[in-house]
Image (cartoon, rainbow, N blue to C red):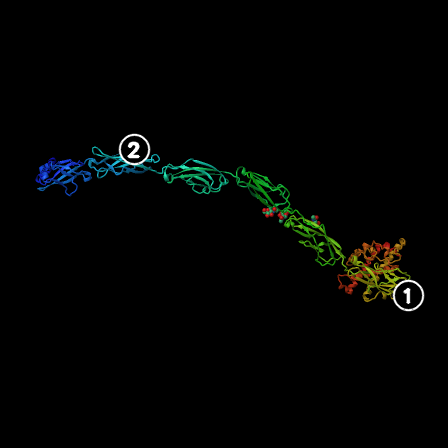
Amino acid sequence: VHDMLGRLRFALHYGLGFVFLVLHPVFGDVSYSIPEERKRGYVIGNIAKDLGLDPGQLSARKARIDTEDNTIQYCSVNLNTGNLVVQERIDREGLCAKKASCVLKQELVLENPLELHRISIRVQDINDNSPQFKEDSLRIEIRESAIKGARFLLDEAHDGDIGENAVQGYSLQQNDHFKLNVQIKDGGQKYCELVLDKELDREDKNEIVLLLTAFDGGSPQRSGTVVIHVTVLDANDNAPVFSQAVYKASLPENSPLETLVITVSATDADEGVNGEITYGFNHVSGEYNNVFSLQPKTGEVRVAGAIDFEKTSSYEIQISAKDGLGLASYANLIIEVSDINDNAPVIYLKSLSNPVPENVSPGTEVGIINVQDRDSGENKQVRCSIQQNVPFKLVPSIKNYYSVVSTGQLDRELVSDYNITITATDKGSPPLSSSKSVQLSVADINDNPPVFEEQSYSAYVSENNKAGSSLCSVTARDPDWRQNGTVVYSLLAGEVNGAPVSSYVSVNGDTGVIHAVRSFDYEQLRSFKVQVMARDNGSPPLSSNVTVSVFISDVNDNCPQILYPAPEGNSFMTELVPKAAHGGSLVSKVIAVDSDSGQNAWLSYHIVKSTDPGLFTIGVHSGEIRTQRDISESDSMKQNLIVAVKDNGQPSLSATCSMYLLISDNLAEVPELKDMSYDEKNSKLTSYLIIALVCVSTFFLTFIIIILGVRFCRRRKPRLLFDGAVAIPSAYLPPNYADVDSTGTLRSTYNYDAYLTTGSRTSDFKFVTSYNDNTLPADQTLRKSPSDFAEVHSYFILSLKFVLRVDLSTHLLPTILRNSEIHFLFITIGSLFNLVLLCSFTVHSFPAITHFP
Ligand SMILES: *[C@@H]1O[C@H](CO)[C@@H](O)[C@H](O)[C@H]1NC(C)=O
Ligand SMILES: *[C@@H]1O[C@H](CO)[C@@H](O)[C@H](O)[C@H]1NC(C)=O
Ligand SMILES: *[C@@H]1O[C@H](CO)[C@@H](O)[C@H](O)[C@H]1NC(C)=O
């Protein structure tokens, strides 16, 4: 059925066409089909025949080809033959481009009658166009990092022809890297892609030239080519590479800044930014940045800071080289620093016994030092020394330790501080040295006793000084330190006259000034010695002693004291002067003593007043009263002399006494002896006194007589001792009266002793016993006495009065003593003592007394 319908349709179709052609002969259309690009004059067909026209009429009918719209007239009619020929070039591509059917419409116009025939000329394509690419060459840039299978779209090739004559396929020149992948678009066009079949390497081949051919399906086949320039773009696939894995350099320490140490270099196969290398240190912290610098572009390593061997002797630095996109590689840079002797030795004082006691024995370690040199090798070897003039030396110990050892005895009092200078020198070249000063103090030891400035001291003081007055000062020096040298003075215990020395003087412990504690009395004490000790405050303390002699000098503070005759007023003494006395004979003697000494006790005697001035003289110094001329009958029987005794002091002191002289050969002749000798004022007291005296005298006389009787019976060997002169018993005289010198002045030594006895009866007794051995020498005679017994008696009286006077002059109870009862008591006691005294005298002096006629 289909087949039938197809045939039917075909038949219908052509049949209708035929019909149409037949039905419209005048206006009938003809169509032709011609290939394009026919030459001019190419006969398309015989139109006359086809239209059934008489070709002879054609020219008559002015047959011509017209276009519908007066465009280009492609064909013309040969009027002779009726052939339709090509007039103009017919280019299908120009007329219809890519249209599948290209029909050129022309009209054949005939006149007379006018006839119009349409002529359709179907232009058939011929393969007259080659496939063509837009450009001759194509540039593609592919990064070398592109992976396999990557596609790169290529330009299409164009062919003006259509159908089979259009582009049918592509082919790619054989190459290592790419394949071609042809694709068909929706419209049926074909295009192609370049597919990377093998990775690129710019460093291997940086440009690839490919030839792409497009071909059509015409016959003969036509083709077009394009050159593809594949530029392989660099990918940063190459890291920089250092020329050495390890760079080594050496550098002396202390190299100046900017010193070139080494230049490192690296290469990078990449190009451009990828091959631009930047050098740097590969470390996180900036620890080397201040020591070395690395020029980022040139790779120069320079000194940028202090190179100190002692701090770092070698540097190991990782350096990096990086290209522009950050690929890096690394190398090690080892810089050895060589030592320079740039460090002086340093001395450290490790320990020091400061202060060191002065008594340390030589060889004692007083300190330890340590010497260090930060350099190395020879530069590190150090010699140590100590300066010469100190008693210390260095003793090397382990390693760099030295002991500071004393070499001699120290003496703080000579050198108390030492500056010990220790010098250390290394063996570098040039050598460096340093020194250290060590202050060492010497501590004190109490090794010096205080020393007095003088061997002994003497102090002179006048008697009657004020208590508390200073006598002298002693000074002792102690060179020790502080309390070891602080001197304290003190008195050493001792006795002066049986009293502790401290009751005489005191010493100021700090100043050494010696003060009198009491007022001194020369008459009691002439000199004494005290021991003063100077002691320091050390522990144990040291001390030394010195003797201070205190000499008391005399002051004329004592009046002469007339011992005989008794002072005026109390005297009832009368001297008998024989009438036959010749001129110059000794009548009596004034005996005076002065407790002072020297000039102050140098007595002179003067007769101040006398009954008969021409009769008696007195020896100025002896006190002896002598007749100046022979006694004459005309001379008054009673002679009265007032004698003044003066000492030689400044001012001089004096005493006076009266001397009653009776020119008579017989005591019985003396009238009113009592009146003359004794002025009784206090009769009651005196009567008691007399009674007492008489009792004592009686007793005494009895005693004497008994003794004398006994003696006379035994042996009778009379020998005149006194040469008829009156002997003054030593009992009431000061002791050693025998030592009266030519001047008649008693020696002061005994004056003192005499006064000592006054205060104490026992002393009085002692005094007697101590001098009773002294027999009275001849020069103590006064004169011949008519009655020895009377003389003895008178001595007795004298002594009694002496005692009495002493009692009265006692300083102890001056007011009480004025009381007459007490006075009497003293008299009585004094008498009794006197009695005892006399007895004792008699017993001891018996041999002498036995010579009394
Ligand atoms: C010891 O050294 C110090 C400081 O160096 C100085 O003041 C002092 O006077 C020196 N002493 C002696 C005794 O040289
Ligand atoms: C005094 O000497 C003693 C040793 O005799 C000593 O121990 C003491 O430190 C010294 N005192 C002073 C103040 O130096
Ligand atoms: C000083 O005298 C005292 C007491 O007599 C004595 O103990 C001491 O040893 C004496 N000192 C000297 C240094 O003679």
Q: In the structure shown, which secondary structural element does the residue marked by tag 1 occupy?
A: loop
In the rendered image of this protein, does residue 411 appear above or below residue 694? above
How would you rate the neighbour count of disc 2 (Cα within 10 Å): few for under 14, some for 14-19, many for 20 or more? few
Q: Which mark is residue 634?
A: 1
Q: Is residue 696 visible?
A: no
Mark 1 near ligand 3 (CB under 8 Å)? Answer: no
Q: x and y percent of residue 448 in the render?
A: 66, 47
In the image shown, does 633 or 168 lie closer to the viewer? Answer: 168
Q: Amino acid at mark 1?
A: Ser
Q: Residues within 10 Å of mark 1 (few under 14, many from 20)?
A: few
Residue 419 relative to residue 149: left or right: right
Camera-side mark, 2 or 1: 2
Q: Residue furthest front?
A: 60
Q: How many marks?
A: 2
Residue 15 placed where, x, y %? 9, 37
Residue 497: quadrant of the picture = bottom right
Pick whichever of labels 2 and 1 is earlier in the sequence: 2
Give the residue type that dot 2 points to: Asn
How far apart, in angstroms, are the residues tagged by discs 2 and 1? 205 Å
Q: Closer to the camera, 613 or 378?
A: 378
Residue 293 appearing in the image: yes
User: Contact, CB < 8 Å: mark 2 with mark 1?
Assistant: no
Residue 529 horizontal side relative to residue 424, left or right:
right
Q: Nearer the viewer, residue 12 or 528?
A: 12
Q: Position of residue 664 (x, y in %)?
A: 89, 63
Secondary structure under the numbered disc 2 in the rendered image = loop
Q: Position of residue 673 (x, y in %)?
A: 87, 65
Residue linked to disc 2: 175
Occupied quadrant, residue 831: bottom right
